[in-house]
Image: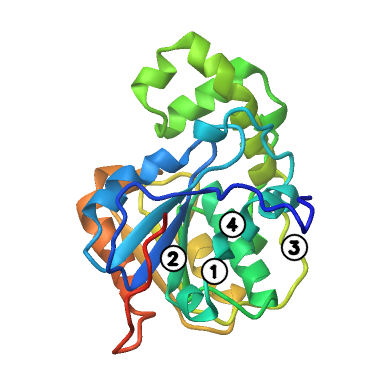
Amino acid sequence: MIPADHAAPSPLRTFSPRTHARARLICFPHAGGAAGGYRAWGLDAPWDIEVCGVQYPGRGDRFDMPPATDLESLLDDLVPGLTRGRTGEELASTVLFGHSMGALVAYEAARRLAVTGRPPGALVVSGQPAPLRSRGGALHRASDAELLADLTRLGGTASDVMDNPALLEALLPAVRSDYRIAETYRPLPGAPLGIPVTVLYADDDPEITADEAAAWAGVGTGPCAVEVFDGGHFYLETRRADVLPRVFRAVRAVLPETVPAWPSTP
């Protein structure tokens, strides 16, 4: 836990600031992922939406930090930086997005923000069963070879990483911690969300079924929209031209008809 009188560096990374942004999309990576995975999203975003990637501890420019061992400690690390310097109005025009494990982190982060009375405007989740339908697993206790085989199966790790044994060895502790968080996840206590939820998934993704996607409707009292795309677990890349407009539409939906621009992330 970070002491109240000590502000930790922000976990948010903005690769293409939007000076006149009216809304912000905060993206939570999948297991083994990093903020840089959303660099292209930031570049492709329209003029009025600023995209931020969340940098988990233990990777990217936070590589020197130990990875989180459970979801609550990860939220302790991340959530304060999501709100620092932001008014309630700005948070109302902020949408949280998460893919796979990142969907669970984004969901629980939204719940924490809601408890403070400053919830985000909406939540978009991708490629992950609803919290009460989480499948669990034991790969976080498996050998390095078995863990790498699962990364290969899912196909979301860049080939230059998979073909670099030294880099893989350095990244495996963070990957294993992410798998532990995802596989041991149970919904944390708390009230249901009261914000819109959008659920995206792919029809050939072995990690989620249509029923598991539809079950996200039970996480809150707000509207829940579900949309399916062609592809596998990492359809976000293969179908990016179709996925991004859908995500940005969910972001724009939280904006009132007239809303002033707010300062870009430093």
Residue at 57% of width from left, 76% of height from top? 119
| Mark 2 surroundings: few (<14), some (14-19) or many (≥20) residues within 10 A | many
User: Which comes sooner in the sequence, label 3 or label 4?
Assistant: 4
Q: Given the image, on which type of amino acid does mark 1 rest? A: Trp
| Mark 3 surroundings: few (<14), some (14-19) or many (≥20) residues within 10 A | few
Up-down relation of residue 128 to residue 188 (above or below): above
User: Which comes sooner in the sequence, label 1 or label 2?
Assistant: 2
**Residue 77 in view in this figure:** yes
How much space separates mark 4 and mark 1, taking CA atoms? 26 Å
How much space separates mark 4 and mark 2, taking CA atoms? 25 Å
Query: Mark 1 = which residue?
Result: 216
Q: Given the image, on which type of amino acid does mark 4 rest? A: Gly
How much space separates mark 3 and mark 2, taking CA atoms? 20 Å
User: Which type of secondary structure does the marked residue at label 4 adopt?
Assistant: helix
Query: Mark 3 = which residue?
Result: 188
Query: Mark 2 = which residue?
Result: 199
Q: Given the image, on which type of amino acid does mark 2 rest? A: Val
User: Which type of secondary structure does the marked residue at label 3 adopt?
Assistant: loop
Residue at 53% of width from left, 21% of height from top? 148
Query: Mark 4 = which residue?
Result: 81
- Of discs 4 and 1, which sits in the foreground? 4
